[in-house]
Amino acid sequence: MLDGKRLLITGVLTRGSIAFEVARQAQELGAEIVLTGFGRGRRLTERTAKSLPNPPDVLELDVNEPRQIAAVAAEIDRRWGSLDGLLHAIAFAPADALGGAFLETPSASAVTAFETSAFSLKALAAALAPALEAAASGSVVGLDFDASVAWPVYDWMGVAKAALESVSRYLARDLGPRGIRVNLVSAGPIETIAAGSIPGFETLAGLWRDGAPLGWDTRDASAVAGAVCFLLSDMSRAITGEIIHVDGGFHAVGAPRRV
């Protein structure tokens, strides 16, 4: 499905990362990939990359540093000349923006959550647009968490995800004429390093375990990764501005089943 595709994948930290499973499946489907890492976390990404079928290179990327974004775009152009797909799997909110203290969160923390988790999708997509356009059918995919309601403990990250959803629609509007698709995959809660930093994450996970019609395994990212790979493939060539829910159907019912 991805034979010959060249992909840039962000967000790989450990084997438990959703992005790691995307990278693994993408390689099995024939893609050539490059990963990104940030600061001290880059070493962790480099170690994790060795577990992939074909260990890829890891580029330095802090999405809040325009120079690093430009450097990654230049390296992609030098290396490949074009880019078939980009996975945006980046999100961060300071501790005081999560955990139930929504009313006390300072503006600086809310801005940090927005810049890192939402604006970065625009920053990356815009910088890589020439390479994606050169591929003739470029695809940008972001990882989302349903922002249609106010979840327990998610707080300003939920606001940032709502912004991410809006950013993806505007990108789909502006990049579509250049042959670039922009979509999101709204995943149910998965036990990752990022999830572990959310106070009360188990509360969210419990909602899905009890309420998803198809059931939900918080330790299994394979279904989410499969949807991402579909959106990165030519099979999704007429889909843009979409949010695909991969959450066991929880978004459709929104409450635990009653027996």
Image: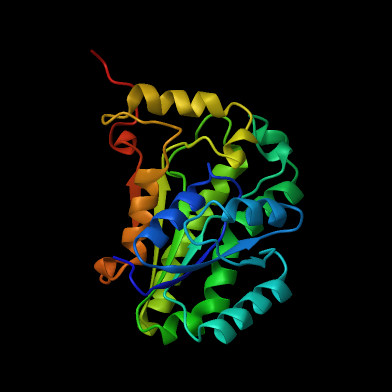
Q: Residue at x 39, y 84 (%)?
A: 178
The colour scheme of the drawn protein is rainbow
Choose between 211 and 166: the one closer to the eye: 211
Name the spot of residue 27 as percent of width and height, x first.
Answer: 41, 61
* Residue 241 in view here: no
Name the spot of residue 180 as percent of width and height, x first.
Answer: 39, 76
Q: Quadrant of residue 237?
A: bottom left
Name the spot of residue 213 as percent of width and height, x first.
Answer: 26, 29
236 relative to 80, above or below: above
User: Dividing the image into 4 quarters, which one contains the N terminus?
Assistant: bottom left
Q: Quadrant of residue 94?
A: top right
Residue 31 lies left or right of residue 120; in this view the side is left
* Residue 40 in view here: yes
258 relative to 232, above or below: above
Q: Residue at x 65, y 36 (%)?
A: 197
Q: Which residue is drawn at 35% across and 78% down?
A: 137
Name the spot of residue 2 as percent of width and height, x first.
Answer: 33, 67
Task: Count how many numbered circles sit on residues in the image.
Answer: 0
Choose between 234 and 142: the one closer to the eye: 234
Q: Which residue is drawn at 23% across and 12% down?
A: 259
